Amino acid sequence: MDSPKFDVIVAGCGPTGAMLAAELRRHEVRVLVLERETEPVSFVRIVGLHMRSIELMAMRGLLDRILEHGRKRPAAGFFAAIAKPVPPGLDSAHAYLLGIPQPVIVRLLEDHAVELGSQVRRGRAVAGFEQDDDGVTVELADGERLRSRYLVGCDGGRSTVRKLLGVGFPGEPSRTETLMGEMAVGAPPEEIAAKVAEVSETTKPFWLRPFGEGRYSVVVPAAGVGDRAEPPTLEDFQERLRAVAGTDFGVHSPRWLSRFGDATRLAERYRVGRVLLAGDAAHIHPPTGGQGLNLGLQDAFNLGWKLAAQVRGWAPDALLDTYQAERHPVAADVLDNTRAQMQLLAPEPGPRAVRRLLTELMDFDEVNRHLIEKIAALDVRYDFGEGPDLLGRRLRDIDVKQGRLFDLLHGGRGLLLDRTERLTAGGWADRVDHLADPTAALDVPGVLLRPDGHVAWIGDDQRDLDDQLARWFGTPAG
């Protein structure tokens, strides 16, 4: 059989697929991204990058270009839309939410992947694949067959790759549905604000938020669960607004209309042989808290360097398996917190009573901070075994003698941050950078950071460090 032309084929060029392609290209992996749609999505839906995702952009040198197109907002009010102020002491140098149009973030990430050398082919849908010991043969809808060493499905909640792979997707179907769109509104702004304040006391989610030039983002509960493949009509919005608020606010001239439900599902496996899943192909949940896009980006960040190591031939035997071991529990936790948030948004007396109680509890800074850091993925700790609390967590962007820590991670390599000036990366220097800096703003002697910024080792013993270098970065170079 011919040698694979590509190392990795990525199905889907949304944020997850584009980020994964870029991460792979940092390690000179040959990447092809296949996107079913012929053109990028044009409608302007605002999405939010949470603190951990903002950190990831800073770690790869992308944040400045993204900030040009986004709007910083307070890092508060995420959990079930309970309005509380930002608590003190959030553990991030980027303690804000970044609102950015979805087409813009997708374009920026795709452009970044292409700049690094990724190939992107639009209008090309995966129709089938077969895998063997040496690679994956991918068949496209037009009959073309491509050969790759690995295939990653980043093709959304209805993932073709996941279905063809036969991976179970257990969970709950949608039981409620919400209409969302952007449209012009005829009613005066003060009338809209007063009515929204009144209705949202008892009906959630419900809002009309100004979008500029007389246009509004409109969210209103649907009457039932419809066909997700069929977008709602303007008449659907008018009818539901009249039913919920007693007026349709004179909505007209929609730019885009959509619906979302509260289906909650998690793939049983993230990997079967040479085929893997990431982003919405691996997990879906309600958009409450705005975690979906962020969860997918973080999947890609976790997987990229590991799959690249496998392709490049230096990955330890179990490294690729840690992708599922680490990311599956994180997704399960996100699904649980969105389930809880949906309950807190329900109109029945019981959920409303629990919401009032939680609203009181969030007056305690510790409770408020805990929930914000959960939504923003600052609380993620991978299980690396016994050790200090920092082990397995991400390290915030700290001051080092060369400036900022994240500036040293642009290349997607590991980093040994050494305050003792006695440690060495030794035979792993081709995969791990070394910064000897006794002035680093760190209260431990040394840390080994993986390319995704998580702390893989803490200490000052070279022999112990060598063991962990081998665990995460394979056999040292001769």
Image: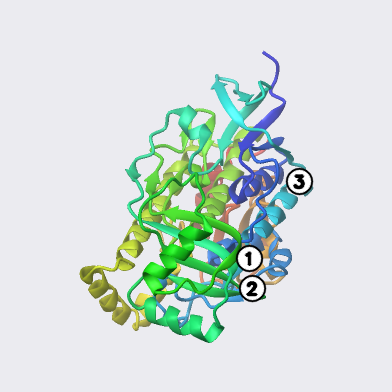
Which comes sooner in the sequence, label 2 or label 1?
2
Residues at marks 2 and 1, CA–CA distance in whole angstroms: 6 Å
Please tell me which residue lies in front, 18 or 228: 228
Which SS class for mark 1?
strand
Q: Which residue is mark 1?
A: 100
Mark 2: which secondary structure? strand
- In the rendered image, which quarter is residue 11 located in? top right
> Residue 71's mark?
2
What residue is pinned by disc 3? Answer: 114
Q: Hey, what amino acid is under mark 1?
A: Ile
Q: Nearer the viewer, residue 422 or 433?
A: 433
Labels 2 & 1 near each other (Cβ < 8 A): yes
Q: CA distance from mark 1 to mark 3?
A: 21 Å
Q: Position of residue 314 (x, y in %)?
A: 62, 36
x and y percent of residue 270 in the render?
46, 38
Looking at the image, tell me whether mark 1 or mark 3 is earlier in sequence order.
Answer: 1
Q: Is residue 414 visible?
A: yes
Q: Is residue 336 left or right of residue 154?
A: left
Above or below: residue 90 compared with residue 385 = below
Q: Residues within 10 Å of mark 3 (few under 14, many from 20)?
A: some
Q: Mark 1, mark 3: which one is toward the viewer?
A: 1
Residue found at the very far top of the displayed protein: 1
Which amino acid, by three-letter code, is at mark 2?
Arg
Q: Secondary structure at mark 3?
A: helix
Q: Give the number of marks.
A: 3
Which of label 2 and label 3 is nearer to you?
A: 2
Q: CA distance from mark 2 to mark 3?
A: 25 Å
Q: Toward which corner of the image does residue 124 lie, by quadrant?
A: top right
Q: Is residue 341 left or right of residue 280?
A: left
